[in-house]
Image: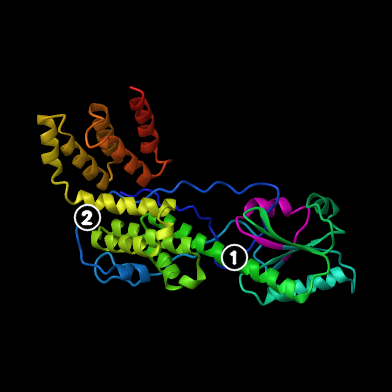
Amino acid sequence: HAEHLVPSARPASANVPLVIASTMSSAPPPRQARCVVGCAFTKRTTLSMRYMSGTPLAGEGAIGGPADTPSGGNMPMEKFFDVTSANFSQILNDSTQPVIIICYVPEEGGNSNTIRQKMEAEVSKTPGVVLGRLDVEQNQELAQQLQLQQIPTAFAIHQKKVVQKLEGNLNDTEIGGFVANCAHLAKLALGEGIVQQAAEHLTNGQVQEALALYGDILKNPKDHSEVVRASAMAGMAMCALFLKDLEGAKGVADALRANYKTMLFEAIVKQALTAVDMALEAEDCGDEEDLEMALETDANDHDSRNKLAILLYSKGDFKAALNHALDIMKRDRKWNDDGGRKLALQFFESLGGQHPDVIEARKRLSTLLFI
């Protein structure tokens, strides 16, 4: 059984990381992350470094292989394209990444046109950066909406917000630095997009593809931010759980805790670590039938009910696991210092707030808190 593992990252285009965005609306909220759990584990000796490097494992359940490249929405794919009043809204609505827009007046030999040409020259030698050209004379209404004060004006727009703006008589150093900053944004967006795409592969049970993408990030750590690298590590841990490799999952989780201490409160990292911890704990919970028999004998055997909840959770029966955790809370808030509520909260954290079983269980939890 697999649930979603979707980090708070935006999809990116591997070929064209920079596309049009807007100053007129806010970025859509990231989807709630969920994690892949629900595997019955068998311990298998696996070097966690193989997960972290993306090296395929031999034998059954081998990882690696070709992976799809992340792709964006319906966006201009040319290195240079014209931005007009007619196409701006479509480009805006179809885009998820940043863009450079140069606003100019196309008079022959004029300063504005010269700077546009210099911007084009800089962008042409910078991989992953595209340029939208806005002819102010032909698109006066759009120029007014953008509240242009000087011509030329260059915008760097990311996540539908202006992150950098240059105006007036720009020199070569300013233009070069401006494009370099946008290239850096493109690289960050690409890393986030790879994490997003890998998570979607994992959600769909395509573990080999997910591992290949996570491995690409970890093989080139200097190309990605710390949060992207930590998210890739978290994804690797979830892949190991999916492959029923508890030993490998533990190794990756240990490396996460040791090497990404400042990232441990990131949602995707917390969820992966919780999932691994729960899976490890489930190994010592005993047999499901024995635990059920113990509860038939004594419904207030909270220790057995706690173990059964963890075991069911590790097998993917989230609803039953949550019900058992909340049943402990209902029967005895003092047991194990409100252990039933704490266990339910662990499940919430691992599954994510938008999971349907979590939404239902939260309603019951709220009711219990006021009894």
- Residue 142, horizontal then vertical, whole percent: 80, 52
Q: Is residue 248 above or below residue 7?
A: below
Calculate the distance from the C-alpha at mark 1 to the C-alpha at mark 2.
39 Å
Q: What amino acid type is highlighted by mark number 1? A: Ala
Left or right, 122 with reference to 288? right
- Residue 192, horizontal then vertical, whole percent: 51, 60
The secondary element bearing badge 2 is classed as: loop
Q: Which residue is mark 1?
A: 186
Q: Is residue 10 magenta?
A: no
Q: Which residues are magenta?
A: 81-100
Which mark is on residue 174?
none
Q: Is residue 112 visible from the viewing direction of this image? A: yes
Which mark is on residue 41?
2
Observer-nearest of 13 and 143: 143
Task: Identify the residue shown where x is 76% and y is 76%.
Answer: 172
Q: Quadrant of residue 346?
A: top left
Q: Is residue 89 magenta?
A: yes
